[in-house]
Structure formats: C-alpha cells, structure tokens
Amino acid sequence: MNDYIDIIQRKRDGGHNTREDIKALIDGFMSGDLREYQMSAWLMAVFLKGLSLEETLALTDAIIASGRKLDLSRLGRRVVDKHSTGGVGDKVSIILGPLVAACGAVFGKMSGRGLGHTGGTVDKLEAIPGFQTALTPERFIGQLEQTGICIAGQSTQLAPADDRLYGLREVTATVESNPLTAASIMSKKIAAGAGVVVLDVKVGCGAFFRNKGQAAGVSYLMRQIGEANGMCVDTVMTAMDQPLGHAVGNALEVNEAVRTLAGEGPEDLVEVVMALAGRLLSRAVPDMDQQRAVSKAGAVLASGKALEKFREWIEAQGGDSSFMDEPELLPVAGYRSPVTAGETGFVQNVDALAVGRAVLGLGAGRRRKGEAVDHSVGAIINAKVGDRVEAGREIATVYGKTAGQAEQAAQAITRAYRFSGKQVAVPSPVLS
C-alpha cells in the first residue's frame, strides 16, 4: 500500500515513474490490491503532469501484459489494421476493410462500440441481420485465413486493463490526455497482432481533437509506441468539422458503405477511404508505392471486386447479405422529418458535433457504456459545405422512432447549418 502511495505521490509532484512502478500499478489494479480511488488519483496526476515517452511505453507494455497477445504469424503475411479516433458518419472501416482485402492484403480489426456522439463500427455492423461480432481469438484468426478480412468486437482477453482504465477515465475527467490516449489505443492494436496500422486521426468540432496541434502530439506518441513494438504505424489527419459522407446512424451508414463499394459513394468519403487504402497497401504489399497503391485500390473498387469481398465477409460472420440487393431489409425508423434550408445561398458549415448529438438523442448511440443502441434511427445530410441551396429545399432528413423525437432532432440539425450569400469552397477531408 505504501509503495502505491509513493508512486502516486511522485507523479503528483511531477516526478518520474519507473517501468517497475507502472507495472506494479497495473498489476495491482487488475488484482484488486490497488483500489479504484488510488488509480483515479494516479490518472489525474498523469493528466496534470503528463508522462514521458519512456513512461508511456511502459504503460502500454503493462496494459498489453494484462491479457493475451495474438500471434498471427501462421498467416504468412503482415496483417493490416486501421483505427479512427472517432467522428460523425465515419463508416470508413466498413468500406476500407473489404477494399484492401480485395487488393490482396489481410485486414484484421478488433473494434470498439460507440460512446457519446461518435458511432462505433461494431454497432453499425450489428445492424446487419445475423452478423456476429463476438468472436473468439481463434475464430478471428481462422476467418482471416479463410477470407482475408475480419472485423470483430474487442476481445476481453486482449488488454483487459485498458477497458477498466478507460472506465475510470470517463468518470474522473481524465479522458483528454495524449499519453493515456496513445497507450490505450496502441495497447489494443499491438495485442491484436497486426503488423501495419494506419491511424485516422480526426480533427475538428466533431472530433476528439479540435486542432492539428493536439492531433499531431498524440499521432507522434502512437507512432513511437508502434515502432518500439516492431509495428509499422502511419497516421493520416482527416477533417471532422462536418459529418463524413451523408449518412449518420447505424443502418443508414451500412447502406451508404454498400453504395460506396458499388461505386456510388460521396466524394469526401471516397477520398478518405482512398487515402487510407494507399497508406495501408503501400506498407503491406511488397514493391507497391503510395501512387501505385491508390491506383490499385481505385481499379479494384471500380471492378466490383471490393463489393464481392464485402459480401463474402458478411456471410462469413453469419450475416444475411441479401440487404445488399434489397436495402429495405435493414431497419429504418418509421417517422421521417425533413430539414429545410431557411435561406438561399451556399452551405458554409454543418456542425458535426451538433449533428452527432442530435442523432445520439434519437438513440443511435449511447451516453453510458452498456446502453443499447437503436440501429434504425439516424439522419441523411444531403447538403454539405459548398453546396448551393434554395430556401425551402430539403437539405437533410431525420428518421426517428416517434414523431416527437424526429422533429426534435430535425430542429437541432437545422441549427447545425450556416449559410453564406457568397460561394463557399468545398473543403478537402484529408488534411495530411
């Protein structure tokens, strides 16, 4: 007990915690010897005083050591993975996975659920009838061998300390810490066994990071952690000031992902997918540079092979793929409320955070961990930044379980829009 207090006190006073100190904290926390209020005190000390790179590496290693680490060497190829720091309308993984798998890479991802205004990939995939996300590590590896792609829910066998630490961070106002965030993300990625990871770091009002400076700091840490563990890590900064694509909400986003794989995706969404595909393929496929990788991904997308791979993947995880031909088979809430433009002009802004919160209020996300989500609700954001609109034109559509819910969300999305009398440039979604 006194040793734990000494470790906490050193960090509180701005001192250095050794690798042994940090391992003792994590081991004690998992065994119950270190109490939650003590770990909370240490997390707050870290939030205020920070961690050095050496301490951050030690924390990552201790979290990994709290569980199992997958060995994917039997696949004979480097497995690629992608992580997003979270945004509104972010269905990129659902498109990117089958695309790079159809290009010859092996895409394996263990994904989390959504919390707050940002959606989770697992929640979206569970809108597909029969689709299974709770897979054992053995089945995860087996499916990678069989189809070259698997996206599953986070296994409790991998980095279990992170789940408990994040639970404390949520209730102690210590989420916004670069070293804690970097250790959290990378511990799970390393434990899952991928050899190549591209990090989609979102920046903007609807993202975890509001500016490039914050994003650059955590990106640097994650690259350092990955490289120290023999992993190839790259980062791409993408914009999250307006929703990505048009659809926001679980089933609606799955349908948009399918349309994108069929060659009918929104330009901003396709641009982000191609940027990430280029980074992944150029690092995973021998003798393929960035330019050739993007060209390859574009050709595969146009050929329909990525859509075929998507169908194969969905069926391999127990899903009914018939919704790809009959989109109405996915759940859509029965009450529709239009959002109309209040003036003629150009869309200057569509506040991603406001849209995300409106859809969260419909039930598409969860405010607390463990809450159920409604796969059928959401919004279609038809008018994006740079689009010209006429007063009274429908610029978005809300789908809710009740008329009151739908109307309330429509009012919130109306307030998310800003217009200009002058032409507005269409922003690039890829920042670096």
Image: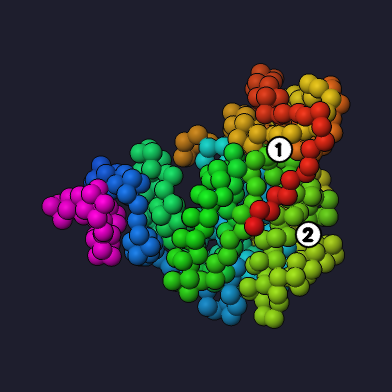
Residue 147 placed where, x, y %? 67, 68
Residue that appears at 36% across and 49% down: 165
- Magenta region includes residue 174: no
- In which quadrant of the rendered image does the C terminus lie? bottom right
Asked if one can make out residue 252 in the rendered structure from this viewpoint, the answer is: no
Span shown in magenta: 1-30
Residue 290 placed where, x, y %? 71, 70
Q: How far apart are marks 1 and 2 (CA)?
A: 21 Å
Residue 129 versus residue 157 in the image, above or below: above
Q: What element carries label 2?
A: helix
Q: Is mark 1 on a helix, strand or loop?
A: loop
Indicate which disc, 1 or 2, sits on the residue closer to the N terminus. Answer: 2
The image quarter in which residue 301 lies: bottom right
The numbered disc on residue 370 is none
Q: Which of marks 1 and 2 is in front?
A: 2
Report the amino acid beneath label 2: Leu
- Magenta region includes residue 16: yes
Asked if one can make out residue 274 in the rendered structure from this viewpoint, the answer is: yes
Q: Is the magenta stretch mostly helix, strand or loop?
A: helix
Label 2: few (<14), some (14–19) or many (≥20) C-alpha neighbours in 10 Å: many
Which residue in the structure is indicated by mark 1?
331
Label 1: few (<14), some (14–19) or many (≥20) C-alpha neighbours in 10 Å: some
Residue 288 versus residue 413 in the image, above or below: below
Residue that appears at 46% across and 60% down: 221
Residue 185 placed where, x, y %? 47, 56
